[in-house]
Image: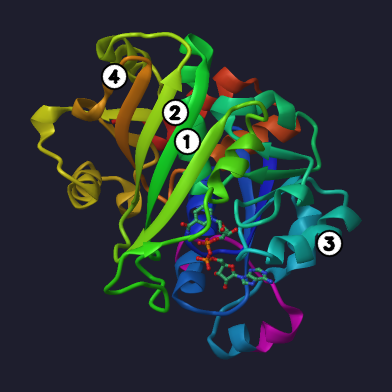
Amino acid sequence: MITVGVNGYGTIGKRVADAVTQQPDMELAGVAKTRPNFEAQAAVRKEYPLYAAVEERIELFEEAGIDLAGSVTDLVAESDVVVDACPSGIGADNKSMYESFDTPALYQGGEDADLVDVSFNARGNYSAAAGASHVRVVSCNTTGLSRLLAPLQERYGVEKARVTLVRRGGDPGQTSRGPINDILPNPITIPSHHGPDVNTVFPDLDIDTLGMKVPATLMHVHSVNVTLESSPTAADVRDLLREESRLFLVPESMAIDGAGKLKEFAHDAGRPRGDVWENCIWEESISMEGDDLYLFEAIHQESDVVPENIDAIRAVTETADASESIATTNETLGIGL
Ligand code: NAD
């Protein structure tokens, strides 16, 4: 059994903690929280051992009537692997704590790539994380792009990828984010940071990305153009992508016209929190013009990195190879729409 601690129990951390409890080869040591908010109370309801992330705030938990199992250092000491799902930049502050316990740590996409030994995507470079002490599970957008580009590169070769990322302004709970009535080139400078981030997984891939932000919370949408090194038909590409377990080809018959209906579909399917772990590629959009592939895909920013964190735990502990881990994670979470 791999004992996993989760430090930072917000959007990503709470999903990873739930996913850990569903794995046959993992147990959850507990989760660390900074304050006794609604998410801390949810952890208590699920009977997850709760640890104080900040010693000075232990009193706040006592005042809220929440029993703590200890402080975050106790959690790290108990864990074989820690998943750090703290806000961007805090993971870097925590690195020395993990090192002092000699506990391997996974960080999230908000941390800099140079913090870690390996930037990770299960489909892209699983084996690179074998035995690593510090691994970064790349961001939601980079995860989505890596899953799409890996099979294209392997089957056809990628001459150049160009992607415009239409990004949600914030997650549903992020009331301070925006815009609420605007369409922003964001970042305004080109290329955006997303392409270089894909290169942390695929160093040799030629990719340029542009970013925008819009008043939406549901998902990101990518407008993708990939110049291939050969000229398959659109049907060939559809067949290739359909074989990928974390790519969902949205059929025309479903009449799903955007992120809203995708989320509704996930809720109707009984997905926890309406999560969509797979890239959602509109099947009708998959088109070839000469060597150029075009498509639209939607990425659920709150959940697509969750299976990747689970696979990264197995990769760093060297307890399964990529295909075994991906299969187990897919089966236990119910991935595959
Ligand atoms: P979040 O704000 O929802 O959750 C972070 C949690 O960490 C909060 O509960 C916060 O109270 C807690 N926290 C703050 N300081 C802490 C500390 N010192 N110790 C322990 N916990 C602390 O953030 P999130 O959206 O889950 O993002 C976490 C990481 O995941 C970031 O690197 C982010 O870039 C990355 N990420 C986020 C998304 C997304 O869309 N939300 C997608 C992919 C990756």
Identify the residue under disc 3.
97
Q: In this view, does 291 lie to the left or right of 104?
A: left
Label 4 sits on a secondary structure element that is strand
Q: Residue at x 57, y 20 (%)?
A: 324
Q: Which of 184 and 133 is in front in this view?
A: 184
Disc marking residue 289: 4
Along the polypeptide, which appears first: circle 3 or circle 4? 3
Q: Mark 4 or mark 2, which is nearer the start of the sequence?
A: 2
Left or right of residue 204: residue 283: left
Residue at the spot of label 2: 148
Q: Mark 1 points at which residue?
A: 145
**Cα–Cα gap, marks 3 and 4:** 52 Å
| SS for callout 1 | helix
Q: Which of marks 4 and 1 is in front?
A: 4
Please state which of the two labelled residues, at mark 2 or mark 4, is closer to the viewer: 4
**120 magenta-colored:** no
Query: Label 1 sits on what residue type?
Result: Leu
Q: Does label 3 point to a residue whose CB lies under 8 Å from ligand 1? A: no
Name the element at disc 3: helix
Q: Are marks 2 and 4 in contact (CB under 8 Å)?
A: no
Q: What stretch is highlighted in magenta?
A: 45-59
Question: Separation of disc 4 and disc 1 at Cα?
Answer: 20 Å
